Every structure is written in structure tokens, then in C-alpha cells.
Amino acid sequence: MVNPGRSRGGSGEWEQPFWQQRGWILSAGFLLVLLVLAAATLMTSDDEAPKTSGSPTSAPSATASDADDAAAGDDRPAGCRTDDSEQEKPTAAPKDMYWKAGGTHLVPVSKSAGPLKFDGPVWSCFAHTPMGAVFAAHAITNNFGLEGWREVVERQVVPGAGRDAYVARRSKKQGESTSGQPSEETFSGFSVLAYNEKEATVMILGRIPSVDKYGSLSVTLRWQDGDWKVLPDADGTVYGGGSYTDGTSGFITWGT
């Protein structure tokens, strides 16, 4: 097993959610975990059945008509217009954030920053902003662990050697998803480490009640074909910067 402070790749343990790695759970017997990182790691197959918390789970309507999209002259998919004016790193979670069930976890989503479309396991149409990248990092990686992971990867991972490596290794896993009770591990917060209009790196923070710890990992995304897509390393590794902490200092918390 790798130490949580080590960089991505090397031992193949990136195949599991970070909260399932010994360095994270602090106990080899602790196999239930966290967030999107929980239900979702690129190589996980341990995700489970969804459960809502009273928040809306239906897809919000698009912010503009398809005609407006065409008139805009950009590469955004039809119906995916968003207000992309806020290009500064966020200092707080958006007020319209709510929770949507994805696997065994509740995933943060937003009517303004995305996702605006929910097509089975593919949650897409994110704002071309730092906040849009934050929601994309949560939603896409979470859904890597669902039954339709192949479609998620095909549509929401940047093509190349990294994606090919992920698919090859993920395909060797037995079973694509499992069912069970909702996980106690939750998404807790985030931090935008780097951002420009082409790429973003987001740190995701998750709470692990069983060990009274928080765990964090970074995800890099690229703006391609009119939406955010996960950008893995050449060996298929998705997460970096792993660490655990006792609190949320340095992160913006979801607050609900």
C-alpha cells in the first residue's frame, strides 16, 4: 500500500478510492468510504445504491435555448449555456448548491455552475468557471464507480494514453458496482489549487467518520469540447496530493 502523502501512481493502489487505502483509513479493516471520490474513484468497483436527503434530484433546466447556443458560436453542447463571467477562484460555495444522489454518496451540484444535464451516469454541462470545475471534479470522479463507468470515461475523460490505461486496468476489475446502504463518508469541502480557461486543479475534501479524519485528493481537469473533462496522468492515475487532516482549514466547506 502507498502512503497517502505520496504522489499518484507507482503501486497501482490508485485503483481504489483513497479512503479505502491504508494510509487513509488508518486501519486495514476499514473498507467503507468516502466521497467521490468515494463512490467513484477511477478504478473502484465498490460503489453502491443511491439515497437522497430531501434535496431535489431532478435535472435543472438549461439556462438558455438551443438557438442561443448556436448563436453563441462556441463549442458548447446544445442547452449548456451558463454564466461564465466569474473567473476568480471562489471564496464560498454557491447559494444554489444542493445534493444529488450518486451511488452511495450525495454529490454537490448547482443550478448555475452545473451539472445541468443528467444522462444516466453522465452528469454534464458545467460552467466554464473555477466553480464549474469544482462541481465537475466531484460529479465525474464520483460516477467513475457506477455501473455505467465506461460511458462516463468515454465522454468525460480526455482522450489519450491516460484514458486508455485507465480503461485497460478498470476492465480487469470484477463487477462494476455493488448495492447497499448509503455511506457515512461525505463530501465536505474543496479548494481550487490552479485555474485558467483551459485547465483547472481542484482539491476535494471528504469526511471519514469512522476514523474521525478528513481526507483530500486533487483532480486535474481540462476544458475540451465545450465542457470540463478529467485529465489523468499517462498511466491512468487520476488523483494526486493525498493527505489527511483533523479539520477543514484551507478548504471551502459545503456547509450543508
Image (tube, rainbow, N blue to C red):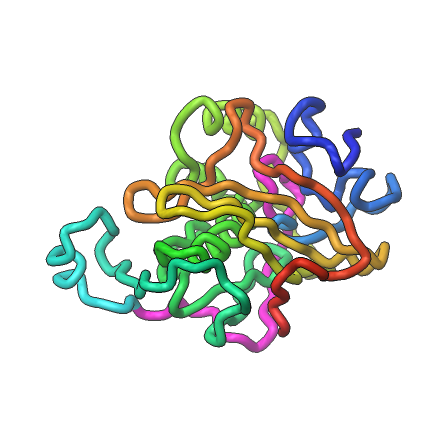
Q: Position of residue 61 (x, y in %)?
A: 31, 70
Q: Is residue 153 magenta?
A: no
The stretch of residues the image draws in magenta is 40-61
Figure quadrant of residue 229: top left
Confirm whether the magenta stretch covers residue 49: yes
Q: Residue furthest front?
A: 88
Q: Is residue 47 left or right of residue 245?
A: left
Quadrant that contains the C terminus: bottom right
Q: Name which quarter of the figure residue 26 lies in.
A: top right
Q: Total of numbered circles in the picture?
A: 0
Q: Is residue 163 above or below residue 117?
A: above
The secondary structure that dominates the magenta segment is loop
Which residue is at the front of the view, 89 or 42?
89
* Residue nearest the viewer, comparing 218 with 185: 218
Task: Where is residue 64? Give x, y as percent.
Answer: 22, 67
Question: Which quarter of the figure is the N terminus placed in?
Answer: top right
Residue name at image x 79 percent, y 33 percent: 3
Point out residue 119 in the picture as x, y percentages from the top left corner. 38, 54
Residue 70 left/right relative to 188: left
Q: Left of 36 or right of it: where is 60? A: left
Q: 226 left or right of 105?
A: left
Residue 145, percent from left and from top: 57, 44
Viewer-closest of 97 and 243: 243
Q: Identify which residue is drawn at 40% across, 36% down.
A: 154
The answer to whether residue 126 of the structure is visible from this angle is: no
Q: Name which residue lies at 40% across and 47% down.
A: 196
Answer whether residue 201 is visible to the viewer in this image: yes
* Quadrant position of residue 8: top right
